[in-house]
Amino acid sequence: MRLSILLALAIAVILAGAFQLAIPPLLEHEIQKAVSASVDQVNYITVDAQAIPATKVVLGRIDKLTIDAKELVVEGLPIAAFLASFQGVQVDVRQILRGQLAVQSVRRLRTTVLLDEDGLNQYFWERVDKSKLFSIRLVGGFARLVGQVSLLGRPIELTLNGKFKIVGPTAVEYVPTELVVSQTRIPNFLLDAVMQERRFVIDLAHLPVPVEIESIKVENGRVYVFGRERQSGEK
């Protein structure tokens, strides 16, 4: 009798260990496929799902979930890197198996979107400045638009100093603060005239997971956009 009980316990432990090892990787693979399907392209992606016990995953309950993607394109926007860290997340497993990452609830989410000069310029030229008169330069903690315009048939070199500003739950905009021509600051009404047809807004509403932008930082030639879980009622 005692031997039978010990054997049953041993089998239970082995099965539990097998489930713990097997189930999370299966879900990770499906989430990876769903994320890849939700963007235009992605060159690198890893997913790490942790749940104890692992059987919770069958019900869509995950203790910790990390999505790490690099060199992806979302709605035409080149993103150098995207990192999402979830804690206490509930997902719809059926939707994931159908190729869609459906997050039903999350206790805590922190995301980082990394944009570099090359990607920003590509997006800026495609969406705003098709003639490529201006280009974006990330210098120190600031952003600049550098280019030239024609005045009385002569090319004039312009530099627009500015910053990225949060203008909505999922959107940031480049806001110029001063226009410099040949090291001379130009009045604001001319600044407004130059920027009237060059409004540059980046909308991150179509990231693989729904986020709300929390802060922005420009550093070492890159723009870091930090986000968190969307508040209740937000679209």
Image (cartoon, rainbow, N blue to C red):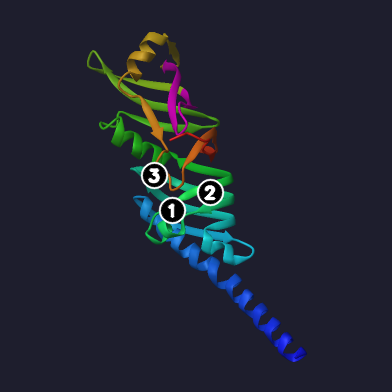
Q: Image point 34% across, 39% down: which residue?
A: 122
> Quick one: quadrant of the N terminus?
bottom right
**Of tags 1 and 2, which is closer to the observer?**
1
Residue ID for mark 1: 101
Q: Image point 74% across, 91% down: which residue?
A: 3
Q: Tally the numbered discs.
A: 3
In terms of sequence position, does the residue under pointer 2 or pointer 3 come before the other? 3
Q: Quadrant of residue 205?
A: top left
Cα gap from disc 2 to disc 3, whole angstroms: 17 Å
Q: How crowded is mark 3: few (under 14 residues within 10 Å), some or many (20 or more)?
A: many
> Quick one: quadrant of the C terminus?
top left
Residue 45 location in percent, x, y? 46, 58
Amino acid type assigned to the residue bearing label 1 in the image: Leu
Residue ID for mark 3: 78
Main SS of residues in magenta: strand
Q: Quadrant of residue 160?
A: top left
Amino acid type assigned to the residue bearing label 2 in the image: Ala
87 or 191: nearer the viewer: 87
Cα gap from disc 1 to disc 3, whole angstroms: 21 Å
Amino acid type assigned to the residue bearing label 3 in the image: Pro
What label sits on residue 226 in the rendered view? none
What label sits on residue 84 in the rendered view? 2
